[in-house]
Image (tube, rainbow, N blue to C red):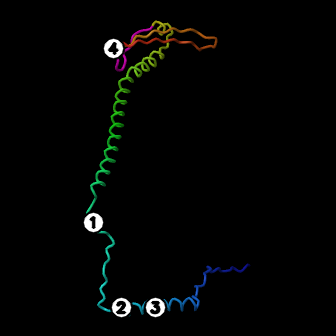
Amino acid sequence: MTAMKTFRPFSFPRPVPSPEATSSVIRHLSWACQALASLPLNHKSKVINHKSPRASRGFTLLEVLIAMFVFSIAVYALTGAFTDTLTTLGTLSVDRTPVEDLRFVRSTVIQEADLSKFEEGGEIETLSCGMATWEAKVEPTTVGDLFNVELSITLTPP
């Protein structure tokens, strides 16, 4: 049988201040106590205001005018940017609907499984521009199951 050893956690010894450090602290404390004892009991300290009398009055006219000028330039720039953004968004929403309708017609027409019906063409109702007429021309290529497709779509407003 082997004897089991018990382990105790290792702790560091507390540091003991040196006599020189202790005497230095005591010397400083005694000096502070003497300084406090030398003050008269009815001593009133004066509060010194380092601000000039002008500083508590407010802003000058020139400072206010400069601040208003800077603010007006910022408002002018932001208003111009906001107006341009609104104009651009309006233009995009008007120009985008025919493109979306052409994409819708193209994706619907290409799903036709019968090649003869696909080549005949036809009419389909669009999402927002009324009716669309389409025609297709299909030509086979040298690769099997690959075709060259020419699709013509005409949008007619309602």
Q: Which residue is mark 3?
A: 31
Q: Position of residue 154 (x, y in %)?
A: 41, 12
Residue situated in front as seen by the camera: 38 or 10: 38
Three-letter residue code for mark 3: Trp
Q: Amino acid at mark 2?
A: Leu
The quarter of the picture where the C terminus appears is: top left
Q: Is residue 85 left or right of residue 28?
A: left
- Look at the image and say whether residue 48 sits in the magenta stretch: no
- Which disc number belongs to residue 39? 2
For marks 1 and 2, the one nearer the N-term is 2
Foreground tag (2 vs 4): 2
CA gap between label 1 and label 2 equals: 34 Å
Look at mark 1 in the image and give the residue it sits on: 56
Residues under labels 2 and 4: Cα distance?
A: 99 Å
Number of numbered discs overlaid on the protein picture: 4
Q: Main secondary structure of the magenta part?
A: loop
